[in-house]
Each structure stands twice: as structure tokens, then as C-alpha cells.
Image: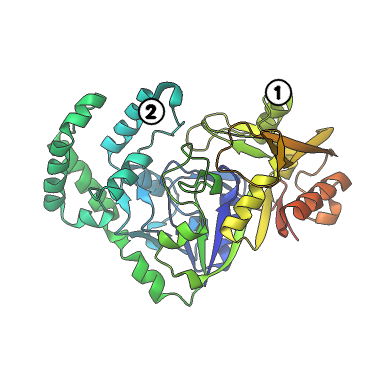
Amino acid sequence: MADLIVGLQWGDEGKGKIVDLVAKNYDIVIRSQGGHNAGHTVVLDGKKYALHLLPSGVLNPNAINVIGNGVVVYPKQLIKEINGFDRDIKSKLLISDKAHMILDHHILVDQAREILRGKNAIGTTGRGIGPAYADKIARVGVRMGELRDIDRLMDKLAHYYEMNKGYFEYLGINTPDMNELRKELEFYRDELIGNITDTTKYLWDNIDKNMLLEGAQATLLDIDHGTYPYVTSSNTIASGALTGSGLPPKALEKVIGIAKAYTTRVGNGPFPTEDLGSDGDKIRKQGHEFGTTTGRPRRCGWFDVVAAKYAITLNGCDEVAIMKLDVLDGFDKVKVCIAYEKDGEKIDYFPSDLEGVKPVYVELDGWDGSEGVTDFDKLPENAKKYIEFLEEKIGCHIKYVSTGPDRNSTIIR
């Protein structure tokens, strides 16, 4: 059976820490969608690891880590991550032969298109994720398993570049030197071929083992159910994790939703509870809210109950983890959005169009001294009231409360 960890906001909720915390209970940890635009930061014994493609289970020496068919893989980044560890992790890593590959031209196209959008820019990370998924849907993409036959792959890419010659010229992009491209693909093959396999079959063959699906990005960035068009290029919700791994729906046993004690967003798009004043700046500073992948400052604001309930329902969450409670230490008051106001009407649901939406807040008394606390009863009284208030409003049990970046700074209720 498989459990799933999924983000409930716009990403960066701290999923990596919870995956790392619980991964010891699982035999297999699976990444099922997204690419190296995602970033998980996990801290173990004071050492920080920034993971972009590797599942967070790599810190568990006993787990098999699977990069599933729904992931778009930039081999250069994956090899860099693998080599960044001071121990062998390749022996515990499997890469789907059906996972699509990001090549350098995807990155160039992504960046050129974002520039052309001008004021309508989405805020993409420029990592080539969207163009790679677009090629996948257009049935002209390249899959990791094609590294097994470089000659055939080169013929395919030569035709692809010829077919897109006019488009590349319009974007001001040069097609790659084919000799250099061959060398690059051969390097990818030599480094990764031993890890590339049919991971769907592997998961089916091991369906009796304990599996953990690790979501990338988050619910409100889902291509169908997020704040379109300011979304990622994959399905980030629970059903997408099944598609991106090949596991059948009945294999999913428990869904754990992850949310910060406040809300952040990277890039453009609607954000009802964004705080553009001193409180937002304080959250950013205390929470070190800068992108793991890009280094960009994150937009910061208050917890949004409406969005959280929407995400919890979409994913069928059984329990929730509230992360970075300690970041709110030192505030006299903390706000929680419990409803929206749209067109003069108060609503309690998450609309398809957030244009003109204003948050309806309640204020709670703040606290100090939650950092590092590992026992719920030892939290400051107002911090306990805050967690209990959120639990009542979102309608889902809050099982985990994170009070610091280290794995051990976690309350389990």
C-alpha cells in the first residue's frame, strides 16, 4: 500500500522534512511528477540538503527511491545531485524509462517565451519544465529509456530540430551542435543507464511493500485545479501521483497534506492573503523565505482556511502537517483568513477565478517561544490555540506540527 504526501498551498510548504521524518517507515519512496523546478530542503544533524529531482527518501539508507514516469528529468541536474552526496545513493535509485527528458533546448525555449510574455509573464523558473511537458503531450518528447539507443535518438532529435527550425529562429534560439549533443547524451547514458528501468512494473511487483509517494509543487499549482494560468505543468494532486507512478487508485491508503502556518507563493498569480506590509516582510525574514531552486524571495501572507479546505477535499487528506509554526513567534497578533469577499458577497469556497477576491480575517493573539518544542502541551498557550483553531476550521486532524528546520523539531499529536 502507498501513502502520499502532498502540498496544500502554492509549494514550499516543507514537504521534504515530513518525507524525511517518516521515510524510515517505508521501503520505497516515489517522486511522481514535476522536475528540477521543485526544491525540497531537508536538514539532518545540522547539515542541509537541497533536493530537486531526487526523492527525499535518499537520506534513508534502507529505502529504494523511484523517479516515476510522470517526472520530467534534466539528466545534468540529476547527475549533479547524485554526485553531491558523500555516499553511494545510486544503488538505491530507480528512474522510469517512461519519464520524459529535459534537454537544453527546452530550457532556452522556456526562458525565451517568458521574456516574450512581458507583463503577462507567469513567473516560471525557466527550467524547461513546461516545454518538456508540452512535447510530451504533442507526442514528440524524448523518454529516458531512449538513451539505450543513441543512434536512434539522434535521428529522432535531428528530425525534431528540423521540424521546429522556424520556431527556434523566431525565439532567437540556435539548435545544438549535433556532435556536442551526441557527447552529452552518451554522458547521460554512461552515468544513468544502470538506474533506468520500468518502474511501474517494479512497483507492481512490490505492491505488498510500504510505499511513500512524494508530491512536488502543490495543489494550488495544479495544471487543472490550481490558479491557472499561474500554475505548473503537471497534476500535483493525489490523482496525479497515481498517474505519475503507475500505481492503481486502490493502492493509495493515506494522504498527508502539508501546509505552512502561514502562506507563501513564488512568481506571479493571485494570492488573497498576501501581506505587502511589515508583517509580510517579517514572515519572509524569520522564515528565510527564499526559493530552494531559484533563490527568489517568496511572497508571504497569512494562513488561508478557504484554500486549505479546497486542497484537503481535492486530495482526500486524512491528516495534515502544519510547518514552520516557530516563524510566527514574536507577532502580537496573527491573522487567519476564514472566508472571502467577492463582488460584495461573502463566500466560503475557492472560486475558479480569484480576481477581485478579498480575504475575511479573524485575529488571534500571538505568542513567543515555540521554536524547537517537541511536546504539544509545552507549546505557548496561544500557539496551541492557533493550531486547535486551524484544525477546527479546516476540518482535518493536524497530526504534525513543525517548530524548526531540524527533523527532531517536530510535534506528533
Q: Residues within 10 Å of mark 2 (few under 14, many from 20)?
A: some
375 left or right of 99 in image: right
Compare residues 402 and 247 and report the one nearer the observer: 247
Residue 207's place in the image compared with 92, above or below, is: below
Q: Residue at x 52, y 44 (%)?
A: 226
Q: Which residue is mark 1?
A: 277
**Whole-percent x, y for residue 305 in the image:** 70, 46
Mark 2–mark 1 distance (CA, rounded to whole Å): 28 Å
| Residue type at tag 2 | Glu
- Residue 152 in view here: yes
Say which element carries label 1: loop
Say which element carries label 2: helix
**Whole-percent x, y for residue 143 in the image:** 26, 53
Compare residues 81 and 327 and report the one nearer the observer: 327
Q: Residue at x 54, y 61 (%)?
A: 4
Q: Which residue is mark 2?
A: 114
Q: Residue at x 66, y 33 (%)?
A: 343
Q: Residues within 10 Å of mark 1 (few under 14, many from 20)?
A: few
Residue 231's place in the image compared with 200, above or below, is: above
Q: How many marks?
A: 2
**Whole-percent x, y for residue 160 in the image:** 17, 42
**Whole-percent x, y for residue 380 in the image:** 86, 46
Q: Are marks 2 and 1 in contact (CB under 8 Å)?
A: no
* Quadrant containing the C terminus in the rendered view: bottom right
| Residue type at tag 1 | Gly
Colouring style: rainbow
330 left or right of 220 in image: right
